[in-house]
Image (cartoon, rainbow, N blue to C red):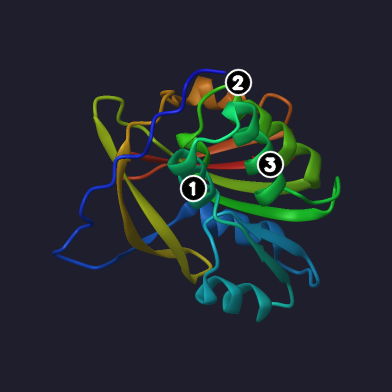
Amino acid sequence: MPSVQPAVTEPAQTASPHQTRHSHGLDQFCASIAGATGLSILDLGGVSQQNVNFLTSRGHRLHSADFLRTLDAWLDTAEGGETALENSLLRECLNFPERSLDGILAWDALQFLPDPLLSSAVQRIHAVLKPQACLLAFFHADEKLATVPSYSYRIGDASSLVLYPRGNRRRPPLFFNNRGIEKLFAAYHSVKFFLTRDHLREVLVRR
């Protein structure tokens, strides 16, 4: 496995503590779980009361894990080698029975994983999702940037997100164009893209 570079943490935006924008990907994700109750959804962006309230008010169960915090905690200690990193991420964030989840909100976390760790995570996600369940993930589309902003994503409503800056990180180790993303999720049933004005690919993947 290639070496994993520590995150670059820079001061968050100061002009505005957060921003709100429309999300076609979230809209489609919410449509995929509409009309059902008692679903199990995983949020890989960490615990958010706003997200908990949104999903539990619709009768669903929300599980939370902070993928990027787990990654950064390992980078701070760097104990046990990169096999330990892979085991830690999969154990702490994706430790669910096979075909037990009805949806996963990965936000922008997956793009910061190096290959083959990324491939292992995508395979594990495929295993824990139920057939036809959806994954929502974001990938930056500007390959010229040295660093990219990372956010905590809060659900405003079924089609809008509130973005809270988590600082900038080094540009993802892989550039994710549409073909690369389709290849990454080749084992899944379908991949749908939504390109936003801020050079962010919203990707809805159906298991």
Give residue 106's position: percent from left, percent from top.
56, 49
Say whether marks 1 and 2 touch (CB < 8 Å): no
In this view, the mark in front (2 or 3): 3
Q: N-terminal of the two: label 1 or label 3?
A: 1
Q: Tell which circle, 2 or 3, labels the residue nearer the N-terminal end.
A: 3
- Which mark is on residue 158? none
What amino acid is found at the position of numbered circle 2 in the picture?
A: Lys
Tell me where residue 4 appears, x and y as whole percent. 46, 27
Binning the other alpha carbons within 10 Å of mark 1 as few (below 14), some (14 to 19) or many (20 upward) gives few
Q: Name the kind of residue labelled 1 in the image.
A: Ala
Q: CA distance from mark 1 to mark 2?
A: 29 Å
In x, y percent, where is residue 201? 43, 39
Alpha-carbon neighbours of circle 2 within 10 Å: few (<14), some, or many (≥20)?
few
Please give the name of the residue rendered at 52% of the width and 42% of the height, measured from the top-left corner: 74
Q: Earlier in the sequence, mark 1 or mark 2?
A: 1
Going 68% across and 68% down the picture, which residue do you hit? 62
In the picture of the structure, the residue carrying the numbered disc 3 is: 90
Query: From the image, which quarter does the C terminus lie in?
Result: top right
Quick one: 81 or 172, which is closer to the camera?
A: 81
Q: Are marks 2 and 3 in contact (CB under 8 Å)?
A: no
Instruction: Please tell me whether mark 3 sits on a helix, a strand or a loop.
Output: helix
What's the CA distance linking mark 1 and mark 3?
A: 14 Å
Q: Which residue is mark 2?
A: 183
User: How many residues crowd mark 3 within 10 Å: few (<14), some (14–19), many (20+)?
Assistant: some
> Residue at label 1?
73
Which is more foreground, mark 1 or mark 2? 1
Q: Amino acid at mark 3?
A: Leu
